[in-house]
Structure formats: C-alpha cells, structure tokens
Amino acid sequence: MEIILKEDIIGLGYKNDIVNVKAGYGRNYLIPQGKGVIASPSAKKILAENLRQQAHKIEVQKAAAQKRADELKDVVVEIAMKVSATGVTYGSVNANVVADELKKRGFDIDRKIITMRDAKHVGEFEATIHFYKDVEVKLPIVVVAENAPKEEVAVEAPVKEETPVVEEAPVVEEAPAEEEETPAAE
C-alpha cells in the first residue's frame, strides 16, 4: 500500500515521501492518526504541485537544518555513568540521556530525532541526529565510569593490605613441622 506521509516518522520516512507499507499499518495507524494519506494518482498530482510551490521554503528549512548540523560537527558527548566491576552500567544510555546532555551544553535537540542503540557498558557509541530529510549528523558518544579514579584507589588499598600478609608468611613457616608429621603418617 502506498502512503504519502504528512509528517516525519523516524524509521519510515519524512514528510511528503511516498512509502510502501503493509495495508494494516496504513489503514489502522497512519491514516486514522493523520500521519499519512493514500497515494492515489490525484493525491500524487497535488503533492507534486505543492512541492513545486514550496521549493523555496524547503530550501530555507534545509539550510537551517544544515546550520544546526554544522554546530554539532565536532561535538563529542561524554556521559559518566555508575558502572559495576565488570564494566556494565547501572541503567543504559539512550536517546533521552543524550538529549539531556546536549541540553546541558546549550543544544536544544528533541529526543525524537535522535536514534541510537542503548549503551549498556563503558565504551564508544554513535548516535544519529536526523535534522531534515538529507541532513543527518553522526554524534560520537563516550560512556565512562562515574568514579573511575576512586575505583583505582580502592584497588590499590587491598594491595597495601597484602604486604602485611607477606610479613605473616614467616609465622606460617611453622607449617613444615606439620609436613614432617606427614611422612610419619606413611
């Protein structure tokens, strides 16, 4: 079933695109919600005329989207999360977290135009921000441990405790006397 989209739907298409969808999805969701209309020959002619008339307006929107994309060109988002000993985060980094972090940096970007797989461990990831039909930005996301320096100090503390254990080793040297008893047991 061919549908003309009336708004952007991430994963399906952008406004004024003609897309093929399953009949049930088109009839039961897109058309009743006002997100699309059936792509009949008359609807296609009306769409072509509207696009021709709005060509200048579309170019202005695309230029504005490109300007916003250029602002994010060299931005790397670093997100500190609580992490378990195995490197797995408590919670996940998703589009909502990325949008909040960008808002803290002064970029007002809607979470709905950000797509990424949920990051559930420490490392580098990539989010895609869809500003306009042909304007997308790949944004690097770095997930780091929230208390990384403190964890290193905690790891060093048991090493210092092991030093007294080594000093106790001479006390354990009395154990060879037990070994002498072992041959006697034969």
Image (spheres, helix red, strand yellow):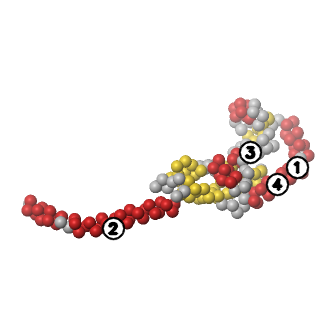
- What residue is disc 1 on? 57
Tell which tag, 3 or 2, sits nearer the viewer.
2
Q: Which type of secondary structure does the marked residue at label 3 adopt? A: loop
Residue type at mark 3?
Answer: Gly
Q: Nearer the viewer, mark 3 or mark 4?
A: 4
From the viewer's perspective, is 64 left or right of 9? right
Image position, residue 9 (x, y; %): 73, 43
Where residue 13 is drawn, which disc sits there?
3
Q: CA distance from mark 3 to mark 2?
A: 64 Å
Q: Secondary structure at mark 2?
A: helix
Give the residue number, with chain letter if any, for mark 4: 64
Measure the alpha-carbon separation of dots 4 and 1: 11 Å
Give the amino acid type for the residue marked by disc 4 in the picture.
Answer: Ala
Q: Which residue is mark 2?
A: 163
Task: Pick whichever, 181 or 172, lies toward us.
Answer: 172
How crowded pointer 3 is (Cα within 10 Å; few <14, some 14-19, many 20+) is rated as: some
Report whether residue 130 is seen: no
Q: Mark 2 belongs to which amino acid? A: Thr
Could you tell me the amino acid type at mark 1?
Lys
Above or below, comparing residue 163 to residue 52 in the picture:
below
Indicate which label's residue lies in the foreground, 3 or 1.
1
